Image: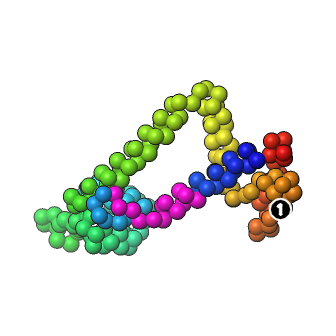
Amino acid sequence: MTYCRVTEQLFEVIRLLEEENKKSRDYGTGVLITHGEALFLETVLRYPGENVSALSERLGITKGAVTQMVEKLSQKELIGTVQRDGNKKEKYFRPTQKGVLTIQGRQTLHRQANQKLCDFIAALDQGEADTVFRFLECLRECAPFCEFQCACKKANRIDEEKHYGETIAAACERAACRA
């Protein structure tokens, strides 16, 4: 069953990542923002003074989506609009101080998580690191894949589940899983 737990843990992490990207989060400024809003705000921070067309092209989204995102972030006081002299028609965007602090809080959170991962990886011996690399390479080769349950999980019975006509149970051949 030890090997089956790897599969369970993998899909638990994937689900967690998907759920985290859907949640709004406060990065220390009292303002809740979604993952998409944070990415947009980071882009405005990185490229201040860009207009709707430039942001649309840079982010690969429609001008309407840029306008909607600007409106959301403006209401949250995270982004401001600037007009340049001689061009009253065109609007340009910059993060507010609260927007900058929000992104800095997000970056701090990510830096801390990344450091924890780096510390873990750095502590692996060569054999452990090789195993992790082989596992990650297998994931890459198999992508995209759907969630499945190791068949040995069900006390050595192979209960195949059907999902859109596909078998999603995988029989584990390891003696440790069959025990």
Q: Amino acid at mark 1?
A: Glu
- 154 sits left or right of 147 in the view: right
| Rendering coords of residue 49 (x, y %) | 24, 58
- Which residue occupies the extreme right position in the image? 157
Can the viewer see residue 151 in this picture? no
**Residue hosting label 1:** 160
Q: In the rendered structure, does residue 143 fall within the stretch colored magenta? A: no
Q: Residue at x 64, y 51 (%)?
A: 9
- Occupied quadrant, residue 62: bottom left
- Occupied quadrant, residue 153: bottom right
Q: Nearer the viewer, residue 32 or 72?
A: 32
**Above or below, 86 relative to 27:** below
| Rendering coords of residue 139 (x, y %) | 66, 46
| Rendering coords of residue 35 (x, y %) | 42, 61
**Above or below, 152 relative to 92:** above
Q: Residue at x 84, y 45 (%)?
A: 179
**From which residue to which does the magenta span run?**
15-27
